[in-house]
């Protein structure tokens, strides 16, 4: 790779700043591209700024990637905060280029400040027009859009850093050492079937009705040698998942404790299947090479947010003309009944999962 690296890095960049704040899933989708960039350009130092809570997602990061947690709500708030942040980064790391993988107001500020210092920049093209055409109520243009991962890769290309994929999962295509999740459960036995279920998302338009998901869990808990791990976070989620764990055998809720991303993702790598909404856990499980069954409602894979290397045959969704009505699932249902989710029979989900974990 050494010769190609020198040719491709035509600007002779040495210290590249990368920014991506916001949702866990969006940050997770940067990993295949950022890790590949680091491996394609081993002589370049990459500095990724994100929210402090996101840095632990970057398991087994390349040596030339430094993760920097930044509090953009308090410590580095507003234009003056961004100015101080960039000055500190330039002083400590001699930043000579900026890759904006977010394209929001605070990263606009960073780009403007970089221009003032003659630092080359490149920003992501989010394809907002295409997303509006895909999600509008009438005259939808039902065409798949460029994936977010591809958009991240294109941003590096515009800066003069073409990338070849050099990523094979956070654990290199293998499962994690079981010691990483020893606080959660004992190692997996040879005949065990481990199923992960992450039934919640940030917005209602992406959540499969809990009463239907409970039917799924009730059925799967009857599988011989099956163990079900429930992933979630908020207080209400903890209560629901905790009640399911008490009600059904061999069901464990992870929501009532904070094991951290590395432990939970290590566990995910040992799962036979992860069942998730269009949410962060879909992306985290995908990044550790686990088969994902994803359930889609108000959103749609066409928007470009499907998990890394996710199998389209394992995506469960209804062919409704009103879908997708939202990119993020945060808009009220036009129909008022969220039929896109409520209309998916629990047996369809059960059958898909069983087909993946039970082999005659």
Image (cartoon, rainbow, N blue to C red):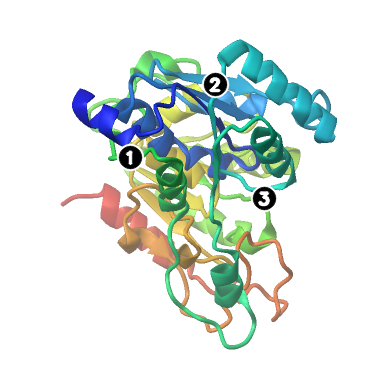
Q: CA distance from mark 3 to mark 2?
A: 25 Å
Residue at the spot x=55%, y=36% of the render? 120
Residue 341's place in the image compared with 264, above or below, is: below
Q: Secondary structure at mark 2?
A: strand
> Residue 266's x, y, as percent?
41, 25
Can residue 227 be seen in this snapshot? Answer: no
On screen, residue 32 versus residue 232, left or right, reads left
Residue at the spot x=58%, y=60% of the render? 208
Badge 2 or badge 1: first in the primary sequence: 2
Identity of the residue furthest to the bottom in this view:
139
Tag 3 near tag 1, CB within 8 Å: no
On screen, residue 234 versus residue 25, left or right, reads right
What residue did someone put label 3 on? Answer: 202
On screen, residue 330 versus residue 296, left or right, reads right
Tag 3 near tag 2, CB within 8 Å: no
Q: Secondary structure at mark 3?
A: loop
Name the image quarter holding residue 8.
top left
Q: Quadrant of the N terminus?
A: top left
Task: Tell me the crowding category of disc 1: few under 14, some 14 to 19, or many 20 or more residues within 10 angstroms, Cα based.
Answer: many
Residue at the spot x=72%, y=67% of the render? 331
Foreground mark, 2 or 1, reads 1
Q: CA distance from mark 2 to mark 1?
A: 20 Å
Q: CA distance from mark 3 to mark 1?
A: 32 Å
Residue 134's place in the image compared with 26, above or below, is: below
Tag 2 near tag 1, CB within 8 Å: no
Q: Secondary structure at mark 1?
A: loop
Name the image quarter holding residue 289.
top left
Q: Which mark is residue 67?
A: 2
Task: Tell me the crowding category of disc 2: few under 14, some 14 to 19, or many 20 or more residues within 10 angstroms, Cα based.
Answer: some
Task: Tell me the crowding category of disc 3: few under 14, some 14 to 19, or many 20 or more residues within 10 angstroms, Cα based.
Answer: some
Q: Which mark is residue 163?
A: 1
């Amino acid at each position: 790779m050494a010769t190609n690296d020198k040719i491709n890095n035509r600007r002779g960049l040495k210290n590249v700043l990368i920014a991506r704040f916001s949702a866990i899933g969006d940050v997770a989708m940067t990993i295949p591209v950022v890790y590949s960039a680091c491996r394609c350009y081993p002589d370049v130092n990459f500095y990724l700024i994100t929210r402090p809570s996101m840095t632990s997602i970057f398991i087994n990061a390349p040596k030339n990637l430094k993760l920097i947690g930044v509090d953009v709500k308090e410590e580095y708030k507003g234009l003056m905060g961004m100015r101080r942040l960039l000055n500190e980064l330039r002083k400590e790391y001699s930043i000579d280029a900026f890759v904006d993988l977010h394209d929001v107001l605070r990263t606009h500020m960073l780009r403007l400040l970089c221009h003032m210092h003659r630092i080359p920049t490149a920003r992501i093209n989010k394809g907002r027009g295409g997303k509006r055409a895909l999600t509008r109520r009438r005259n939808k243009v039902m065409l798949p859009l460029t994936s977010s991962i591809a958009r991240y890769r294109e941003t590096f290309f515009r800066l003069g850093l073409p990338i070849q994929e050099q990523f094979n999962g956070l654990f290199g295509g293998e499962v994690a050492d079981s010691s990483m999740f020893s606080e959660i459960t004992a190692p997996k036995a040879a005949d065990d079937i481990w199923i992960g279920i992450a039934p919640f998302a940030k917005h209602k338009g992406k959540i499969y009705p809990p009463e239907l998901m409970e039917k799924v869990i009730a059925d799967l808990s009857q599988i011989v040698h099956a163990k079900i791990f429930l992933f979630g976070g908020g207080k209400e989620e903890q209560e629901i998942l905790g009640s399911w764990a008490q009600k059904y055998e061999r069901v464990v809720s992870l929501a009532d404790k904070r094991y951290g991303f590395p432990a939970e993702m290590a566990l995910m790598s040992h799962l036979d299947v992860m069942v998730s909404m269009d949410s962060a856990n879909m992306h985290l499980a995908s990044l550790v090479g686990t088969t994902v069954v994803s359930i889609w409602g108000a959103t749609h894979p066409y928007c470009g947010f499907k998990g890394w290397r996710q199998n389209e045959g394992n995506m469960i969704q209804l062919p409704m003309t009103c879908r997708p009505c939202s990119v993020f699932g945060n808009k009220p249902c036009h129909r008022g009944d969220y039929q896109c989710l409520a209309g998916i029979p629990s047996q369809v989900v059960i059958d898909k999962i069983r087909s993946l974990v039970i082999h005659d």
